[in-house]
Amino acid sequence: MNDCAFCRIVADEAPATKVYEDDHLCAFLDIRPITRGHTLVIPKRHAARLSDLDAELGARVFRLGHRLAAAVQHGGLAADGANLLINDGAAAFQTVDHVHLHVIPRKHGDKLRFVKGLVLRRPHDPESTAAAIRAGIAAKDQGAQP
Ligand code: 5GP
Ligand code: ZN
């Protein structure tokens, strides 16, 4: 096992509040969220940068980000939108060298709260937040066309 913090989360060797997991991907709450429900989507297989990431796996990462953006709007979080973002490389402020897609729920008129969140990065109740996101995923999956 390498010393990557996100690989340790994948291996359940470090704690994290996971909201989704499959054979290829894992999604868990950011430990220092900008807004409530700020989630990171990662490939399970370690890739430090986008240039190290298989394109098909990258597509899976985005597809899950797409689902989560819908989930935070349809579950208990009742977001009105989301910012999806990848910081690729130190020049772009990447601080954890394992590719991750940020999904940051947004509400209408939350500009001041967003800026405050950017400065404070305080966790919200992780269990109820994760439960709301999981419910949003389930609600979207039920409504999905086959
Ligand atoms: P970056 O600037 O690399 O795009 O963002 C890395 C993100 O990972 C930050 O938002 C930071 O709060 C989050 N993070 C760093 N270490 C951990 C960790 O051990 N667990 C979790 N859940 N999030 C982390
Ligand atoms: Zn890793």
Image (tube, helix red, strand yellow):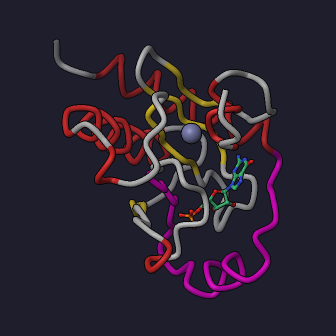
Q: Residue drawn 64% across and 64% down? A: 35
Quick check: 125 above or below 61?
Answer: below
Say how many tags the image has: 0
Residue depicted at 40% across the width and 48% down the height: 69
Provide residue 32's location: percent of width, then percent of height: 74, 61
Direction from residue 51 to residue 101 in the image, left or right: right
Quarter of the image where the C terminus is located: top left
Residue bounds of the magenta highlight: 101-125
**88 over 76 or under it: above or below:** below
Foreground of the two, 132 or 14: 14
Please determine whether, in this image, residue 142 is positioned above or below residue 99: above
Foreground pick, 25 / 35? 25
**Residue for point 39% across, 60% down:** 84
Residue extending farthest left: 146
Say which quarter of the image contains residue 145: top left
Q: Is residue 146 above or below residue 130?
A: above
Q: Per the image, is 114 magenta?
A: yes
Where ligand 1 lies, by quadrant? bottom right
As for residue 95 lying within the magenta part, the answer is no
Q: Position of residue 38 (x, y in %)?
A: 60, 55
Residue 44 image position (x, y, % from top left)? 49, 28
